[in-house]
Image (spheres, grey):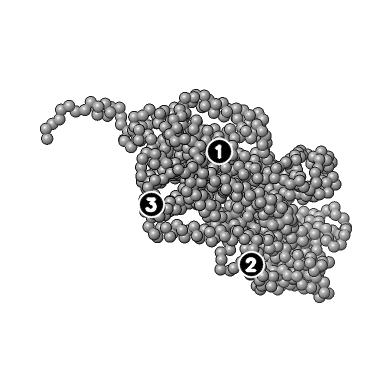
Amino acid sequence: MAFRLKLVPDNTKIDFFRWQWLTTGISFVLMVASVIIALTMGLNFGIDFKGGTTIRAESSTAFEVSDYRQALEALDLGDVSITEVFDPTFGADRHVAQIRIGATDDTGSVTPEELNRIEAALQVVDPNVSFAAVESVGPKVSGELIMTAIYAVSAAALGILLYIWLRFEWQFAVGAVTALIHDVLITVGIFSLFQLRFDLTTIAALLTILGYSVNDTVVVFDRLRENLIKFKTMPLIDIMNLTVNETLSRTVMTAMTTALALAPLLIWGGDVIRNFVFAMFLGVFIGAYSTVYLAKSIVLWLGVRRDWGKPEKTQKAERDELAGTPFQDAP
Amino acid sequence: MLQIPTWKRILILALVALGLLYAMPNLFYGRVEAHNDAIVEAGRAGFETPEQAAARSLWPDWLPSTLVNLGLDLRGGAHLLGEINVDEVYQSRMTALWPELRDALAAERDSLGGVRRVPGPPDQLHVEIGNPDQMSRAVQIARTFAAPVVSLTGAGASTLDVTASGPTLIVQLSAAEKAATDDRTIQQSLEIVRRRVDEVGTREPTIQRQGQDRILIQVPGIGSAEELKELIGTTAKLTFNPVVGRGTDPNVQAGLGNIVVPSMDEPGVYYTLAEAPVVTGEDLTDARPSFDQNGQPSVDFRFGPQGARRFGAYTTANIGQPFAIVLDEQVISAPVIRQAITTGSGQISGAMSVEESTQLAVLLRAGALPAEMTFLEERTIGPELGQDSIDAGSKAATIATVLVVAYMVASYGLFGVFASIAVVVNVILILAIMGAMGATLTLPGIAGIVLTVGTAVDANVIIYERIREELRAGKRVVKAIDDGFNEAMSAIIDANVTTFIAALVMFFLGSGPVKGFAVTLVIGIATSVFTAIYLTRLLIIIWLERRRPTELVL
C-alpha cells in the first residue's frame, strides 16, 4: 500500500451550517470593522497614489536614520519621512533606507537639481550611500492612478458577477460577489490596521485575491449545481453540506499548494515585493474561508430554484396538472 | 475519452517540445543577449567587427534566440511619463500667422485704417482695426487664411475661428483644428523621442502614446531618469529670426512681437529679434557636422522645399541685414546675409568643438520637440537592485516548485509526478510564449508565475479528487479515470474563465506592475489548462496502456 498524504480524510461529514449565524456574523463584523478601520486610520498610500518621491538609498555601512534626517532637514524639502528597511535576505554589508518626500508642485515630478542636492547632502553623512532606485510620481498622475485602480477592481468584480450569473443563477452570482467583496475589504482592513504600504502592486494583489476567491467559490458552486440535479428532493442545507464536504479535500489541497508556492516568495523574495506577496498569501486563506462559510450562506438565504431544466409553470397550471383529468374521451 | 488518436498525441508532444526549444535560450540569457545585440549592431553599422563576430558565435544561429524581455524592475533602467503641452503649439501658430495677417490687412489700409496687435490670451490673435465699421472686410481677409481641417473627424471644418468684438478682430484655431493639431503634435513628439532614444542605441526601449497627450518612455539599461530626461529634454529648438537690434541691456523695450535673446558666445550681448521665425528646425531635412572655410567645426544643414523657399525669399529681400540663428533661446550667431541663399542649404559655425558640432547635428537631425514636455512620473531602478530581484525571485520560484512537487507526489504518488511534470512544463511554456510575444517579465510577473504554479495544480487536484471519489464509489480504474476527467471539466473551465476575466481586466485597465502581473496570469491560465487537461491526460493514458493496472491507489 503506497503512502498517501491526506490532510482531509475521505468521507467527511462536517456540519458547516451548525454555526452559520456565528460564522456569517463574524464575516460581517470583520467587513464592517475593516471599513471603519480604513476610514478612521486611513491607508498608508505609497507615492503611486499620493504623489511624491521615494528614494531607496543603500549603503555598505550601517547608518543612523537620525543622521539622514538631519542632513535632509537642512534642504527644506517639506514632508520627508525616512525609514530603515530590514530584511532577512540582506547581507551584513547591506543597509537600506526608504526616503519619502511629499509632492512639492502641482503636476511635475522631482527635479534633477533637487535629487543631486539630496544625494550630496546624504553623502556628507554617509560617503558609501548610493541610490538604488528613485521613483517620483506627480500629484496629477497619482490621482488618476487611484481612479484607475478603483475602476479596475470594480470592473473585474462586475465581469465576474456577469459570468457567474450567465453560467449559474443570480443567487450564486450574489453569493460569489459577496464573498469577493468580503475578501477584498478584509485585506484592505488588514493593510490599514498594520499600516502596510498600499500602492499599485497592492491593487494587483487585490485583483488576484478576487480571482482566486472566485475560482474557489465557483468550483464549489459547480459541484452544488451538480448535486442539486442529482438529489432533487434533499433539503438545500443538506445538499450544501454534502457539497462542501465533497469538495473540502480539493479546497484544502489547492489552498495548501498556493500557500506553498507563495511562502518562499514571502520569505526569500526580497523586501521589494513583500507587501504584494503578503496580500496574496492572506487572500488565499480569507478566500478559502469565505467560500466555505460566506458564499453558501448567502445562496442558502436567497434560495435556489430546484426544478432545473423544466419550463417555469404558473401556479394554476401546476394545480391543473395535479388535478388531472379523471375522464378521457375514448379515441 | 481515454483514447487519443496518434496525431493528437504527436501534436501535444510537439507543442511541449516547441515550448522547450523556445524557452531554452532563457537558460543562457547572457550569451544569447550578446549574440542578439551583436547582430543588431552589425546590422546598424552595415559591417561586423571581430568582437561582434565573437559575440555572435556564442549562440548558434540556427537555434531560436528569442528571450523574455526583462522589465525595468528586473534589469534596471528608467521610466518616464511625459505630458506634452499641446497648447503651446496653438500659440506658436498664432505668432507665425501674425506677420502674414498684418501684411494682408495693411494692404487695405485705405479702408481698414491702422492695424495693430493688442494683448490677448496666448492662443488667440487680437488685432485692433482703425475703422471698426469695416470689420466685416477684415473678417473676410482673415478668413482667407483658413483652410479645411485635414483629419478624419474634423473633415469639413475650417482651421480658423474668426470673430469680431468691437474694434477687435479675434483669430484663433477652431476646435477641430485644435484636435487635429494635438494629434499631430503627439505623433511628432513620439517620433522625435523615438529617434533620440534610438540615437544612443540602448536596447528595446518602449515609447508609447498614453491617453490624450502623454508619452510613456521606458528605457532599460540607462543609468537614470535624469539622463533620459536630458536626452529627450534638451530640445535643440532651432529657429532663424530677423534681427531688430543688438545691445547690452537685457531689459530693453523689445516692442510687441519682438523678443530679447542673449548671445551664446558673446557674454553680455543681447539681441532683439522678431518673435516669428522665418524658418524653424522643423523645416530641416538634414544636418551633418563639417568644417567651415577657416577649418573650424561647423554644421551643414539643408531645408525642405517650403523652408528653402521662405529662406530664399527672406535672404533675397534682406541682403546686408543680420540674421540670427537661435538655438534654445540663445543666439548662436547672427551673420550678415551676403547673398540670396536659394539652394536651401547653409552652414552654422561658431565657437564649438568637434564633439559639440556632432552633438548639435544629431539633435538637429532628430528635430525639435514641437512643444514642451512636462514629466509627471519618473522612475529609476538601479541595475544592482534589478539583479537582486532576479536572484531573489528565481530562488523563491525554485523552492516553491520543489515544495509544490513534493506535496503533490506525497499526496497522489505517481499521479502527483504527472501533475508535477505538467506544472514544470507549464512554467516553461509561459516563458516560451512570453518570449515569442515580446511580453515583458516584471517582478510582479514572477509572483504571477508562482501563483500560476499554485493554481495550475488546482486543475489536477480537481481531476484527481474526482477520480478518488469515483474509485471510492467502486468503479474500475479506467472508468474512474475517464469519469473523473469528464466530471471535473466544467469546474475547471468555470474556475479558469473567472480568473481569466479578472486577469484580462487587469491587463486592459492596469498599468505598470498591475499589467506586468496580468500578462503572466493571462498566459499562465491558457498554458495551465493545456498542461493540466491535455498533457496530464496523455501521460496517464500512456501509463494505463503500458501497465494496464487493475487497481489504483490515489
Residue named by callout 2: B58
Marks 2 and 1 close (CB-CB < 8 Å): no
Residue B231: image tag: none
State the residue in front, B189 or B97. Answer: B189
Mark toward the viewer: 3 or 2: 3
Disc 1 residue type (three-letter): Val
Q: Give a yes or no on whether discs 1 and 3 share a subunit.
A: no
Nearer to me, B169 or B276: B276
Q: Amino acid at mark 2?
A: Leu
Does mark 2 fall on the same chain as mark 3? yes
Q: Secondary structure at mark 2?
A: loop
Residue A127 higher or lower than A78, as above or below: below
- The answer to whether dots 2 and 1 both sit on one chain is no
Answer with left or right where residue B229 lies relative to residue B410.
right
Residue identifier under label 1: A284
Relative to A187, residue B283 above or below? below
Quarter placement of the C terminus of chain B: top left
**Is residue B78 in view?**
no
Dot 3 amino acid type: Arg
From where the camera sits, is residue B369 visible? yes
How crowded pointer 1 is (Cα within 10 Å; few <14, some 14-19, many 20+) is rated as many
